[in-house]
Image (cartoon, coloured by chain):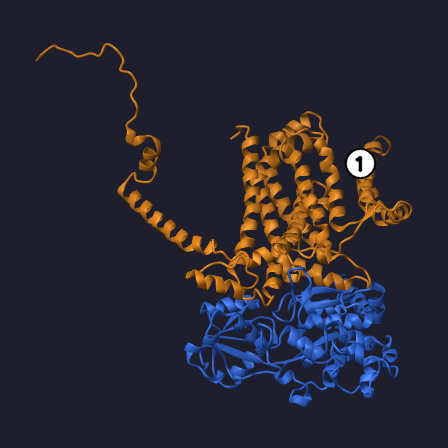
Chain colours: A orange, B blue
Amino acid sequence: MSNTHYVRSEMLSEQEPPAATTGAIGWVRENLFSSAFNSVVTLLALAFIYWLLAQALPWMVSPTWHASSLTECREIIAELGYGGACWGIIRERWLQFMFGFYPKELYWRVVLDFILLFVALAPVLFTHLPRKMLYFSAIYPFLMPWLLWGGTIWNPVMAALGFVIGYLASRHLAPVLGNLAATILAFVLPVIWWIFLSGPVADGIASVLPLAIQSVESRAFGGYMLSITIGVVAIALSLPIGILLALGRQSNLLIVRSLSVGFIEFIRGVPLITLLFVASTLLNIFMPPGTDFDIILRVIIMVTLFASAYMAEVIRGGLAALPRGQYEAADALGLDFWMAQRLIIMPQALKISIPGIVSTFIGVFKDTTLVSIIGLLDPLGLSRAILADAAWNGLVWEIYGFIAVMFFIFCFSMSRYSMYLERKLQTGHR
Amino acid sequence: MKKTVLVGALAVAGLSAGVAGAATLDDVKARGKLNCGANTGLVGFAAPNANGEWEGFDVAFCRAVAAAVLGDPTAVEFIPTTGKTRFTALASGEVDLLARNTTWTFTRDIDLKFEFVGVNYYDGQGFMVPKELGVSSAKELDGATVCIQTGTTTELNLADFFRANNISYEPVPVETDNEAQQQYLAGACDAYTTDASGLAAVRATFEAPGDHILLPEIISKEPLGPLVRHGDNDWGDIVRWTLNALISAEELGITSANIDELSSGTDNPEINRILGTEGSLGEMLGLDAEWAKRAIKAGGNYGELFEKNVGETTPIGLARGLNAQWTNGGLLYSPPFR
């Protein structure tokens, strides 16, 4: 036995990893062909994808963009020798899909409204933007209906004034009348203003100073514009109403609690389509003759109520997940109820509920297609009307595919945003 | 407590329905627009074109009424109604007139308290089957799967027909015409049944129409017509006689092309009475003398409307059949303008 030892006296320099484990090849080997089973699965999947694309791509790129009827499409496709889509219908009708029956010369108002929606949303969604933009966000809810429906500017101004009244009441009456009375008056005064005073006042000012743009009837709304209008309003309103309902459900005041629970359970207990039928048919019968209660407004109210009930439960989930200590800490700091909610409870509860909230948003947006059943022409309702055109009757895939892709874009963006928000608000308390 | 609220609500509803039915003509004139309940989309009968204007056979009738009452065939607000919402829309006063290929039946007329003013299209329920099924009569359809639209009279007719012939079938319920086409083409059902006009329209859109046949049996009577609410007979009269004017115009040879010429006076007193150069028919209706002239001018007489929207020159290609004038062996027979 020899006593010779081989001991390395200097470090070996680092070597490149084997070529087979780096770069694209390495990635492929590791992820796709790491074992015999994986290799088989990969090959099968590739074959499937190839088969799918080989079927779908020629169909999708068929040169039928300029066809003006299904018959024309079929002639073009017959020359091709393989199956193809008939895209002429999208070229001819895509504006209708976007704007419904909105007057063509006023399309700019809808587009502007949509752009302004993003301007108004931006500071709410992305906190690094200048805070002053929030003023515009506050104005936007009154600007939006005015641009869409037109008419005199004084109606939205008077509606906004109601909120100002409520704010002033809660601000300045509290020292005089006490907190409870001020809070109640902050709710009651604006309602009185809206119901009894704002109409005549708006008419009065309008007769002196008529600042108005051409008004558009609700019946002219259709397509994505209708979906987005209903969806955005319902989404925007359902969150605050949902928060209030969730708080009401946890309240110690018997009346507030029973009203909240009753409302939530009733709305969640009936299908949305039932509420829509109530909006479209029953309300019409019960209202005095001659009242013209806008059908879209009725639908928006119903969808909002529906979404709020679900939202309330999602937020209640967030509230329930907060440790008891948070509430006690807020009390210990001497914060009153609203301050505690605003500064301590809600920021945490809402953060927890983000996935649920966004799910509800997405659900509401997709539920807007149900209005086609009561005869409103949302994209789905419109597709039926368009397919009744003798030139296009018989098409299915192209039109429904188009609708599906558009909905996917909207819903997918919402879902990505929610993931961004979750990452951003991640504070490590896990 | 609940009961009283319900009774109260019903009382209000009844009251409002009664009031709403009082003077539709005045409402329409005050509004300046006719609210017309239309189909959400039916080939040849109602569909929006690329400019967003409604077109079709039923739509044309609404325009004729608007022209007669308001003097403007475009003064119509088309309110799309589905099979489920159409009757409430009319009953509640949301629409003044429903022209939505609705079958005139006893219960709809009496029980739902509507008034059908006439028939603008005589239809009947038929069957379409693929040629390769090798069936030549509906009575051979024992055990077949049948695609059928829900919520329509066709559903009930089908059940009656199969029961009367003591054969069985399996229904495949579908919601819309388009869905039915797809199901049928995909082979989900052996036969598709709906109104014969609809079948012809559907078959015309197929890639190979020759591979499908319409079976000879027509298993029901489907007189489709415009309808109004019970209780406002003056309004019902206006709508009824507008339809009659269109039908009479075809019989008497008044077309949109020669109407101006004819309205300067003719030897035929009935033409003169319709066009308002003789007598005071318009006044009796509460309209002016030229109401019928405007209605006919809006889109043409019945025959012109038929040819333009569903006739043999269109892709739908319906023959006049039962919808020819009585003088040509059809069922169209307008009472005289006298």
**Pointer 1 chain:** A
The quarter of the rendered structure image containing the C terminus of chain B is: bottom right
| x then y, percent, for residue A418 | 56, 38
Instruction: Check disc 1 and give the amino acid type.
Output: Tyr
| x then y, percent, for residue B310 | 62, 74
**Left or right of A290, for residue A77:** left
| x then y, percent, for residue A43 | 31, 46
For the point 80% across and 79% down, the residue is B261
The quarter of the rendered structure image containing the N terminus of chain B is: bottom right
- Residue A283 image-quadrant placement: bottom right
- Residue B195 image-quadrant placement: bottom right
Q: Secondary structure at mark 1?
A: helix
**Left or right of A4, for residue A329:** right
- Residue A235 image-quadrant placement: top right
The answer to which of B336 and B165 lies nearer the viewer is B336
Dot 1 alpha-carbon crowd within 10 angstroms: few under 14, some 14 to 19, many 20 or more = some
| x then y, percent, for residue B330 | 65, 87
- Residue furthest left in the image: A1
For the point 67% across and 50% down, the residue is A230
For the point 45% across and 56% down, the residue is A59
Q: Is residue A335 above or below residue B140?
A: above
The answer to which of A90 and A140 lies nearer the viewer is A90
**Which residue does the numbered mark 1 point to in the structure image?**
A167
Note whether residue A75 is visible: yes
Q: Is residue B30 above or below residue A135?
A: below
The answer to which of B317 and A53 lies nearer the viewer is B317
For the point 66% across and 51% down, the residue is A225
Q: Is residue B292 above or below residue A250?
A: below
